[in-house]
């Protein structure tokens, strides 16, 4: 047989061998679920094929094929690269170079995803000195086949050149950079099981620095060397196995290299390990929620043990010196860290497990805990039991932490990381690592709660006063702000139990207050905050703040200024703690307006429409005079406006629209004026034109075509049949070229409003990946308002491009008159409320048809 045919035959044989062995290995994993076995057998199958390919290549005897990286470590994930080093004794001649190229081509032809380098020993040493990644990969080098003496020479020279201290600094710095890339949290809702904090890479860093220092090469040798306990070694092996299992399943599910636990695959991975959803409806917990809570608990353990181990290794590598300075009989300060005075401090004095966090708030110069203190606390945390929680001294310590002038959030986060917070508050432990599939929370429940407490704390700090000056002002005058932190700790503590978490949480809050000796008046405030933490947001964003009845009802519910201020501060902190995307200045203005109006009512000043009308008109007239307009410049427009217009617009908006329109009222053409929004980002667009049934839909069609998001809409019809509508819109590029965009909107929208062309059909905008994974069942609710004068139309659905235009199109079809539109976007979810009327709504059958068509429009 010709040589070429023999080579081709061998190539096909090796390819079949690799494929068959892979299928057997994957089938075996499906049966036994043992990831280590799969990784080892995949590596062995590749070893065998590589050996055959190496023999076929006929390379010189003084060359070696070396596995590096994960493959060198002896494990191979289903779709990971096979990292190889072809080690040469000297630079290759032309013949050897040709054979090397043939070998690499053969490996690719076999379907192996290889990452390869071809180097001499000298080149390996040079590259290793220059690049910590190369140095790390050589640390795990393993001879696959070839010249063993050449491989031994490389290892000897590598070890001689390795500086364990420099390696430690480089790898820990690299780890910090990687953590920063993943926002320094193990609790990302879509974590990377390999790279995220608390993932596989953090485990590998421990073994790398330990091996480089000559201290250990496995979890067992770390334990026998005294760097960790046998219990810690067992925990680390368990977590490593769990992460490897997830990563294997991710690869197999995706059919490619994939390390991210994205929403799309979480349910499939959960079900592949035997997890199932429980409950139904509002009480349902998804299989993915169980999976992710397990993942977060594992990542949390890895994060803590990673800290302990790296501190231990650092103490072996570096002479840190420093004498222990006594803080009290139980604790010392060592090199800026707090340490226990004796190994059994927590054994003989369990209360010290809370005292250590209190001391860190009282001594802000302390940067953290020593590895010894952390490890002792980690192992003794189980002593925080019912008796511990009932101890009056421990309850007093916990309250003192919440009442500390500084360091509260750092203390709570450390307590959570070390599972102390969850053991002290058992119901808090239930929500550690619990996901929230409401499409606007981007944190797990426990992380969201701590974020809300952090936001509350920032209101007390002068360095953050510029962020939310009004909140800082209110907090400065609020007695006992620590009560707000208690309210924040409990406001979402009942998430995931089924039922109304606001109601369920009040039981926990009331019990906590009673057990910790908080007096009746303060306890009532905390319980009020937990029960009503969503109320202010609901009123501000969904109800008409110009309606005296709305304000009166809200004022009655909050009762006094103290409750109002506390609820306002918690509401702002809560919204800001859900997601960076949810908060905006417009929502901030609505909440502040509601606060100020309600405060006046609580102060005895009735929220009178007549009084408010007079005040706003006087303020607007005073401002108009500053622009040098004729004294009667406002009269022609204002004669056509009713009370509702003045109550729904600020004086500044009234002035702007009056100035824009006073000399254009009789132009006969639509007037479109645009300016930067006075509050926050975006643009304010005012439209004045003869009213027509499709006007709102026509305007929405324009904003839809431009990919503008509508944050708010005020719709007003004048006495002589003109529309005076105002929209708040936003889009990412506004800040870069707002002048050009303003001119474009004024021209193009004005042209569109003169057109009689039929409107284009609404497009079915694409849902985001998150919305596709967790779709919302669209809802439509139509009911008369309290006076029976108008109807309130509420819709909820997944957000998508063109949604508001689709709704407007249906309203046009039924000739519905729109008076106001409250547009609320919560991440990937929209909850819009419209105030409408129209003859169509007087017929019950038409109402049903309208709701049916709206539901169809909300679907994708």
Image: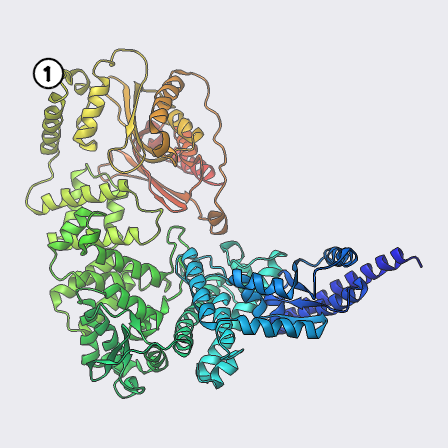
In the displayed orientation, state which residue is furthest to the left. Answer: 604
- Estimate how packed mark 1 is, as few (under 14), some (14 to 19) or many (20 or more) residues with alpha carbons within 10 Å: few
Element carrying mark 1: loop
Number of marks drawn:
1
The quadrant where residue 281 appears: bottom left
Report if residue 585 is visible in the image: yes
The relative height of residue 723 versus residue 41 in the rendered view (above or below) is above
The one of 603 and 106 positioned closer to us in this rendering? 106
The relative height of residue 201 versus residue 711 in the rendered view (above or below) is below
Report if residue 279 is visible in the image: no
In the displayed orientation, state which residue is furthest to the right. Answer: 1
Image point (33%, 53%), residue name:
578
The one of 532 and 779 positioned closer to us in this rendering? 532
Q: Position of residue 814 (x, y in %)?
A: 40, 28
The quadrant where residue 788 appears: top left
Q: Position of residue 90 (x, y in %)?
A: 70, 63
Image point (45%, 83%), residue name:
231
The quadrant of the picture occupied by the N terminus is: bottom right
Image point (57%, 62%), residue name:
126
The quadrant where residue 158 appears: bottom right
The one of 316 and 187 positioned closer to us in this rendering? 316
Image point (64%, 73%), residue name:
153
Q: Position of residue 256 (x, y in %)?
A: 62, 56
Q: Position of residue 644 (x, y in %)?
A: 20, 29
Image color mode: rainbow
In the rendered view, does 731 fall on the left or right side of 292? left
Identify the residue under disc 1: 631
The relative height of residue 181 versus residue 590 in the rendered view (above or below) is below
The relative height of residue 81 versus residue 847 in the rendered view (above or below) is below
């Amino acid at each position: 047989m010709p040589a070429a045919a023999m080579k081709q035959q061998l190539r096909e044989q090796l390819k079949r061998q690799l494929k068959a062995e892979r299928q057997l290995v994957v089938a075996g994993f499906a049966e036994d679920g043992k990831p280590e076995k799969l990784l080892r057998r995949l590596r062995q199958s590749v070893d065998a094929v590589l050996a055959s390919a190496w023999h076929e290549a006929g390379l010189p005897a003084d060359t070696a094929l070396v596995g590096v990286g994960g493959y060198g470590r002896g494990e191979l994930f289903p779709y990971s690269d096979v990292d190889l080093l072809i080690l040469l004794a000297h630079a290759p001649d032309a013949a050897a170079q040709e054979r090397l190229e043939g070998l690499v081509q053969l490996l690719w032809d076999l379907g192996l995803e290889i990452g390869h380098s071809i180097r001499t020993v000298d080149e390996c040493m040079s590259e290793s000195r220059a690049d910590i990644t190369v140095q790390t990969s050589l640390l795990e080098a393993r001879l696959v086949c070839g010249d063993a003496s050449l491989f031994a020479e490389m290892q000897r020279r590598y070890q001689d050149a390795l500086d364990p201290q420099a390696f430690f600094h480089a790898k820990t710095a690299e780890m910090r950079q990687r953590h920063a890339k993943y926002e320094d949290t193990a609790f990302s809702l879509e974590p990377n099981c390999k790279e995220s904090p608390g993932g596989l890479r953090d485990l590998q860093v421990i073994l790398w620095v330990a091996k480089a220092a000559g201290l250990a090469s496995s979890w067992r040798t770390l334990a026998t060397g005294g760097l960790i306990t046998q219990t810690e070694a067992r925990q680390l092996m368990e977590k490593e196995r769990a992460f490897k299992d997830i990563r294997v399943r991710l690869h197999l599910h995706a059919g490619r290299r994939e390390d991210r636990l994205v929403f799309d695959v979480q349910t499939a991975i959960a079900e592949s390990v035997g997890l199932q959803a429980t409950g139904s409806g509002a009480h349902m917990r998804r299989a993915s929620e169980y999976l992710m809570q397990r993942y977060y608990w594992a990542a949390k353990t890895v994060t803590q043990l990673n800290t302990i181990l790296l501190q231990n290794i650092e103490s072996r590598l570096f002479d840190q010196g420093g004498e222990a300075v006594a803080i009290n009989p139980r604790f010392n300060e060592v090199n800026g860290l707090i340490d226990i005075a004796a190994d059994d401090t927590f054994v003989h004095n369990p209360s010290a497990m809370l005292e250590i966090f209190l001391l860190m708030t009282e001594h802000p110069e302390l940067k953290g805990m020593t590895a010894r203190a952390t490890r002792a606390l980690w192992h003794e945390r189980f002593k925080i039991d019912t008796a511990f929680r009932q101890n009056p001294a421990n309850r007093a310590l916990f309250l003192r932490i919440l009442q500390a002038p500084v360091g509260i959030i750092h203390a709570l986060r450390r307590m959570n990381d070390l599972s102390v917070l969850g053991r002290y508050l058992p119901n808090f432990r239930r929500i550690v690592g619990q996901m929230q599939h409401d499409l606007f929370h981007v944190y797990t429940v426990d992380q969201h709660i701590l974020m809300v407490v952090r936001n509350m704390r920032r209101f007390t700090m002068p360095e953050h006063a510029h962020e939310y000056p009004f909140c800082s002002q209110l907090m400065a005058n609020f007695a006992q702000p620590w009560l707000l932190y208690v309210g924040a700790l409990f406001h979402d503590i009942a998430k995931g139990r089924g039922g109304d978490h606001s109601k369920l949480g009040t039981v926990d809050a009331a019990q906590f207050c009673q057990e910790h000796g908080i007096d009746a008046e303060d306890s009532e405030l905390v319980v009020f905050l937990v029960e009503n933490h969503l109320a202010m947001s609901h009123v501000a964003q969904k109800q008409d703040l110009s309606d005296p009845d709305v304000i009166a009802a809200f004022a009655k519910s909050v009762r006094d200024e103290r409750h109002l201020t506390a609820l306002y501060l918690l509401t702002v902190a809560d919204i800001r703690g859900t997601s960076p995307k949810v908060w905006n200045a417009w929502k901030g203005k609505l909440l502040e307006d509601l606060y100020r109006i309600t405060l006046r009512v609580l102060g005895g000043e009735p929220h009178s429409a007549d009084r408010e009308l007079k005040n706003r008109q006087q303020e607007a007239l005073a401002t108009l005079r500053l622009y040098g307009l004729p004294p009667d410049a406002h009269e022609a427009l204002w004669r056509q406006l009713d009370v509702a217009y003045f109550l729904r617009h600020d004086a500044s908006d009234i002035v702007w629209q009056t100035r824009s329109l006073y000399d254009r009222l009789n132009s006969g053409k639509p007037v479109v004026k645009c300016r930067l929004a006075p509050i926050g980002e975006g643009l304010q667009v005012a439209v004045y034109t003869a009213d027509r049934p499709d006007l709102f839909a026509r305007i929405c069609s324009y904003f839809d075509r431009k990919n503008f998001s509508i944050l708010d809409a005020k719709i007003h019809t004048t006495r002589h049949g003109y529309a005076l509508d105002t929209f708040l819109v936003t889009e990412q590029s506004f800040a870069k070229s707002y002048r050009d965009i303003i001119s474009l909107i004024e021209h193009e929208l004005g042209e569109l409003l003169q057109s009689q062309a039929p409107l284009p059909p609404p497009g079915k905008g694409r849902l985001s990946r998150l919305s596709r994974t967790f779709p919302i069942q669209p809802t439509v609710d139509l009911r008369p308002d309290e006076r029976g004068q108008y109807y309130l139309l509420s819709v909820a659905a997944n957000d998508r491009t063109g949604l508001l235009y689709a709704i407007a199109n249906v309203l046009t079809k039924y000739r519905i008159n729109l008076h106001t539109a409250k547009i609320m976007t919560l991440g990937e979810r929209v909850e819009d409320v419209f105030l409408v009327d129209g003859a169509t709504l007087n017929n019950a059958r038409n109402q049903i048809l309208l709701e049916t068509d709206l539901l169809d429009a909300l679907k994708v």
